[in-house]
Image (cartoon, coloured by chain):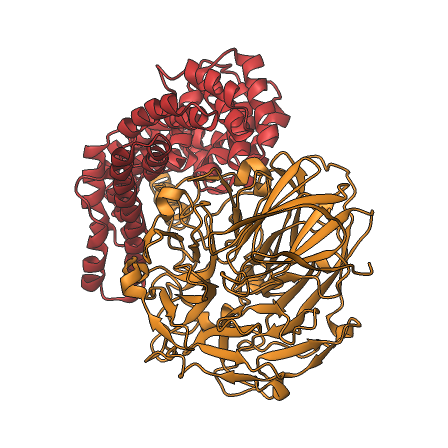
Chain colours: A red, B orange
Amino acid sequence: MIRTLASLLLIAAGICWAQTQQPSVEAHLGRGTQLMQDRLFEAAATEFEQALTANPTDPRAHFQFAACLLALGRNDEARSQFEQVRKLAGESRYVTYYLGRLDLLSNDYASAIKRLGSVADDPPAPDTAFYLGVANISSGDVPTGIKWLERAAKLLPRDYRVHYRLARAYTSAGRDQDADREFTLYTQFRDAHKTTEKDARDCTAALQTGPPAAAREVCHRVFDPNDPEKLTLLGQLFGDAGAFEDALDPLKRAVQLDPKSFEAWHNLGLTYFRLQRYAEARARLETAVNLRPEFYGSVVLLGATLYMLGDDAAALPVLEHAHRLNPADAQTADVLGKLRAGRQKK
Amino acid sequence: MLSCIIVLNAMTRREFLAFLAAGTAVARVSHAQESSGMASRGVKPQPRGKPSGLPFHARFTDVAASAGLRTPVIYGPPDRMDYILESMGCGVAFLDYDNDGWLDIFLLSGTRREGPVEGASNRLYKNNRDGTFTDMTAKAGLLRQGWACGVTVGDYNNDGRDDIFITGWPQNILYRNNGDGTFTDVTAAAGLLHSGNRWGTGCTWVDYDRDGRLDLFVSNYLVFDFEKIPPTGKDPRCNFKGVPVNCGPRGLVPERPMLYHNNGDGTFTDVSAHSGIGAVTPGFGLTAVAADLDGDGWQDIYVACDSTPSLLFHNRGDGTFVEQGMQSGLAVNEDGNEQAGMGIAIGDFDLDGRLDVLKTHFSEDTAALYRNAGRLFDDVTLRSGLGVETRYVSWGNGINDLDNDGLPDLFWVTGSTFPEVERKHPEFPHKTPRVLFRNLGGGRFEELLDAAGPAITEAHASRGVAFGDFDNDGDLDILIMNINEPPSLLRNDVSGGAHWLKVKLVGTRSNASAIGAVVTAVYGGRRQAQAVMASSGYISSGDRRLHFGLGEASTADLEIAWPSGAREQVKGVQSDQLVTVKEGTGVVDRKRFSS
């Protein structure tokens, strides 16, 4: 879900909106996006509010603020912000998607079906069909709801929520055999999710307290060579514990399996950076920044990598971008000042 | 010049590297690393709408002290909870043990691991009929100190007197009412002693085979041993928001529930295996309730499970059960997530004549309200307006008409299981207020934060709750267990002149307590079902006299589905009285209270 939300924010940021922004707007948006990534929604909302104070007509700020408000459960305010986006930037299927979800939350099933149905053929998010199915079932149209939930199950085959809702819908329709099959899938994926959570906890504890060899054995339970999200999680767990060499393999496999995973690329770049393998870090971080140009953490890390490689000419614009995203970062400002001074002296 | 740049760059690069090493974060994937305790989902509250502005005519005042309920209920150390056993607390009961028509009180109690605490005991208080109670514990033969947990009240031997069964760790107890103000521990003689340690929690009398005798269902929580479970601080996985806390239930070993058949001679037989109850995948079972949830005339059993899917045992009518929690929709919430099931309330909040379910959970999660749609239940938590409240760990609960307006309201008590946390995170206090949602009609509720009297806003670490009219004034009062404090007795003073009706059932073919009966009252164009239950709230037992607020209606028609399968109707019952209906005979007694 968080990844979906973050991806939507990125895609939305790519919509052709005004390019000339005040630096402070960029900074607030950058910080807000990072805070949302860290699930610190209240703090993120404050950043987006400040971005809107700096430029009340920036549709990106309204959009990100709206998505953040939705995550906070402030649904009426979220709706108002999405409506603002529509006024400022015109119709967008992303806004329609979110408004449809808000309709669903406010029990306005007819409107949810209309909105989500209008974007279902080119869904802005993989869970569009899921919410459309839920809206249909809630409105009493179980057959149509089942049709959309079946599509959602194809798009999100590992999402236990989808299988649970589909199983319940089949039960309502008296299709007990289909229901049993979906309940089985639900249980399978829910159990897998819980097992992963437990394994991750055990891995963290083992890395904190146990000898490295024993910890690796415990952490290997998280390893799934075919699941990029679990591989990224494993890399993250090793990285959190400073076991960067151990983090490399799962992260390399994760980016192979899911080349669009920002988290995997960023963490792989970060791992190479921590291992002082700057050339290898550079390529991975460039990919991460391409996937998320507004994510301060990746941008500043790429700038630092270039800087450590001695490629000051390449580092300068990247660090300038990082500084725009986070002007409060005194160290980046300091380095930037020195880099600029060095170039002038040359 | 060149050397100057090199030096500058070298210094800066090192500084920069150090800064990055300290501050650069990983990008996290979505697998949240929950603490190993209870299921808390990090749910954000829904926004509170504009208040309705409608008056609420119930006002609650805690009269426990003036009523004579001043002895603290001991449960673990006063300032910490090192083990999960110390954190779960216990239930309470309203009962009429002396058949004088006035509700008496039975309070369970715990102890402390370090050793017995002077004065700590389960306690029986006799109602003096003047708003006060007298402690009869010793005289009744009920003095006992230990880790008592749940309680269910019912007449298991059909002698016309309320008996008491209590669960606990490491042993459960059956007290037979001798009819002379005393009780006898008949656990062993009844065949209810079990070998080894077992932590019984929820319990309910239930006539599952319709033979007219109350059988006994017990839910067990987990395998507990002070010597084998690490206390707070000894296992880094046991933390909440980074603060070390007691371990469990996740990570500990869950236990299966049990069913005992009443043989009719004072003894019971463990039929867990034969009935299918024991075949279920074990969960962390807490409150257990029995009621005919699907309206097929047979008692089903629903168990709130903590951090595992809750269990619904559908009664097949042949002495066996099949677990159908998932199929029914009662196992998990609407997204398929298990919750920290604590308390269960059964009632008909939407007045469609079907029994709905309210289940309470941990903080950062909502309570769950399930609407009975016939064979299936729909999770209507968010659409009913309950999503506004996610702050508290929630326990004993009820679906009861507290203001007599004819619409059942929702109430529950709260209190943290981790007193250590508030020192670091003041937003998670140990003692927290009560929660009351008034029914607005149309399936919508509104939380009343300070409109129902001072006793609602007072903060305690509460657990069990029982509802009953202890002062016989025509409204529902509330008895609450508070950990390491005296109990609360919330006297309800209803104004506004709304009408009410109480119904007491006496079984003949059915068990004498009529446990399992469903009464549907039709009044003022409304139709409300209520079940006679032996267990409700959080491992507690309430007044078996059903209380219907009637609003402006001055009469009601009653439809009674007896647990024997018989059905009876009583037409045109006048409001503002207690009527006693005997199975097969009709109304045998009417009492008007002075309100």
At horizontal 34% and vertical 38% (from top left) the residue drawn is A164
Quarter where residue A144 is shown: top left
Residue B350, above or below B534: above
At horizontal 46% and vertical 45% (from top left) the residue drawn is B295
Q: Between residue B594 and residue A52, name the one nearer to us.
A: B594
Is A219 on the left-hand or right-hand side of B499? Answer: left
Q: Quadrant of the N terminus of chain B?
A: top left
Residue B445, above or below A61: below
Residue B254 in the image: x percent, y percent? 34, 64
Can residue B2 be seen in the rendering of this structure? no
Residue B22 in the image: x percent, y percent? 40, 51
Can residue B555 be seen in the rendering of this structure? yes
Q: Between residue B227 and residue B26, name the one nearer to us.
A: B227
Q: Between residue B171 and residue A117, name the one nearer to us.
A: B171
Q: How many marks?
A: 0
At horizontal 49% and vertical 73% (from top left) the residue drawn is B157
Is B576 on the left-hand or right-hand side of A237? Answer: right
- Residue most extreme to the top: A90
Quarter where residue A341 is shown: top left
Residue B497 in the image: x percent, y percent? 82, 47
Residue A165 in the image: x percent, y percent? 37, 35
Quarter where residue B229 is shown: bottom left
Residue B149, above or below A223: below
Q: Quadrant of the C terminus of chain B?
A: bottom right
- Residue most extreme to the front: B585
